[in-house]
């Protein structure tokens, strides 16, 4: 039996890789919010306008990585979610649903940040939840930092509305951390993040979220699942405050390294983001790899080759650090 398990697992890994069963990364946990008959959200024209901007900006960027970006526009589908998938290394997909876009919490900028989150699974890099996919928290950070500045359409109206909604303390942080011209992107990223955190809060499994109630929990190991709504808002805020100035759009941090969740991958990610301060990854989901980190668990399969193949498929396994 001990011999059979590694052989079976190895076959599963090889088969999964060969046939592209690389997993679909969703913006939200599975839910039944589609059963709620609520009005609001954005229009189909706004839905398509955001996706047009994404295709125009990111189509060539993804092509530079040797892949083709496909965005499936499922406006008529009531699913309250969005997802990314990579069935092959050269085929990158986003699935965007009208059910999410029509939720009353969702604004045009909020929907744009959902699209950016899904792009982040492909492009944001370390930390990884799968061989191709950045985890949820990192994808949130990518949305309001690297992606927002690329796809937010210039709008004095949206700039003013976001500035008016932000508490003075957060608006001042945006002003302190960004030059004129980038501050408005910071305002809008944070306000968009709040609309999405409100949507996530509608799942009913967390307290109401707020700009002034950050998640004070501290994880001992990086959480690769969907963080709580407040923790995700904290990530949107941190990403917006860090901004895009350090980001290298020609690099996916950690992807070229043998171990994508290693200290070397982390160092590459820190080189292109804010390692410390207000723009750093929140500790409610991220635990830096250092000498004080808990020791990695032992791979339970007893075969180093199988363990390595499992790590290639899913780097978030606790023995892959």
Image (spheres, rainbow, N blue to C red):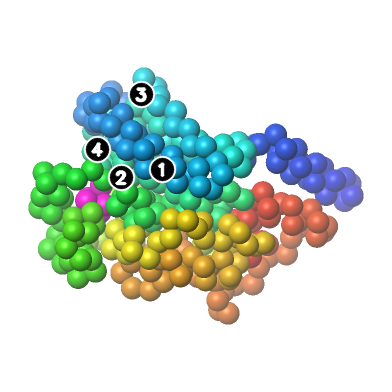
Are circles 1 and 2 on residues that touch, CB within 8 Å? yes
Please state the total of marks drawn on the protein image.
4
Q: Which residue is mark 3?
A: 75
The secondary element bearing badge 3 is classed as loop
Are circles 2 and 3 on residues that touch, CB within 8 Å? no
Q: Which residue is mark 4?
A: 108
Residue pictured at 48% horizontal, 51% vertical: 123
Q: Position of residue 300 (x, y in %)?
A: 76, 57
**Image quarter (top left, top right, bottom left or bottom right) of the C terminus:** bottom right
Q: Where is residue 195, by image quadrant?
A: top left
- Specify whether residue 256 is in view: yes
Q: Which residue is mark 1?
A: 58
Residue range of the region highlighted in magenta in the rendering: 187-192
Question: Mark 1, residues whose alpha carbon is within 10 Å: few (<14), some, or many (≥20)?
Answer: some
Q: Which mark is residue 180?
A: none
Vertical position of residue 91 compared to residue 177: above or below: above
Q: Counting residues from the N terminus, which is met first, the one under dot 4 or under dot 3?
A: 3
Q: Which residue is mark 2?
A: 151
Q: Position of residue 294 (x, y in %)?
A: 59, 72
Residue pictured at 40% horizontal, 26% vertical: 73
Answer with left or right where residue 58 lies relative to residue 238.
right
């Amino acid at each position: 039996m001990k011999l059979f398990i590694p052989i079976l697992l190895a076959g599963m890994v090889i088969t999964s890789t060969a046939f592209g069963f690389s997993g679909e990364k969703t913006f939200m946990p599975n839910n039944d919010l589609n059963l709620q008959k609520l009005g609001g959200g954005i229009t189909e024209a706004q839905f398509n306008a955001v996706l047009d901007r994404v295709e125009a900006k990111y189509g060539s960027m993804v092509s530079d990585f040797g892949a083709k970006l496909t965005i499936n526009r499922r406006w008529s589908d009531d699913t309250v979610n969005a997802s990314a998938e990579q069935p092959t290394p050269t085929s990158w997909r986003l699935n965007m649903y009208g059910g999410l876009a029509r939720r009353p919490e969702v604004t045009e900028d909020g929907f744009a940040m959902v699209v950016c989150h899904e792009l982040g699974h492909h492009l944001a890099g370390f930390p990884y939840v799968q061989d191709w996919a950045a985890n949820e928290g990192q994808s949130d950070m990518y949305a309001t930092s690297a992606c927002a500045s690329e796809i937010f359409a210039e709008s004095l109206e949206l700039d003013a509305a976001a500035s008016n909604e932000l508490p003075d303390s957060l608006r001042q942080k945006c002003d302190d951390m960004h030059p004129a011209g980038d501050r408005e992107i910071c305002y809008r990223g944070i306000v968009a993040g709040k609309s999405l955190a409100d949507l996530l809060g509608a799942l009913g499994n967390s307290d109401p979220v707020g700009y002034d109630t950050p998640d004070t929990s501290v994880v001992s190991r990086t959480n690769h699942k969907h963080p709580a709504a407040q923790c995700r808002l904290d990530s949107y805020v941190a990403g917006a405050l860090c901004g895009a100035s350090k980001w290298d759009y020609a690099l996916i941090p950690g992807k070229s390294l043998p171990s994508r969740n290693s200290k070397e991958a982390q160092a590459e990610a820190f080189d292109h983001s804010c390692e410390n301060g207000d723009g750093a990854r929140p500790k409610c989901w991220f635990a830096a790899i250092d000498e004080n980190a808990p020791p990695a668990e032992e791979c339970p399969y007893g075969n180093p080759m199988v363990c390595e193949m499992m790590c290639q498929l899913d780097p978030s396994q606790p023995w892959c650090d």
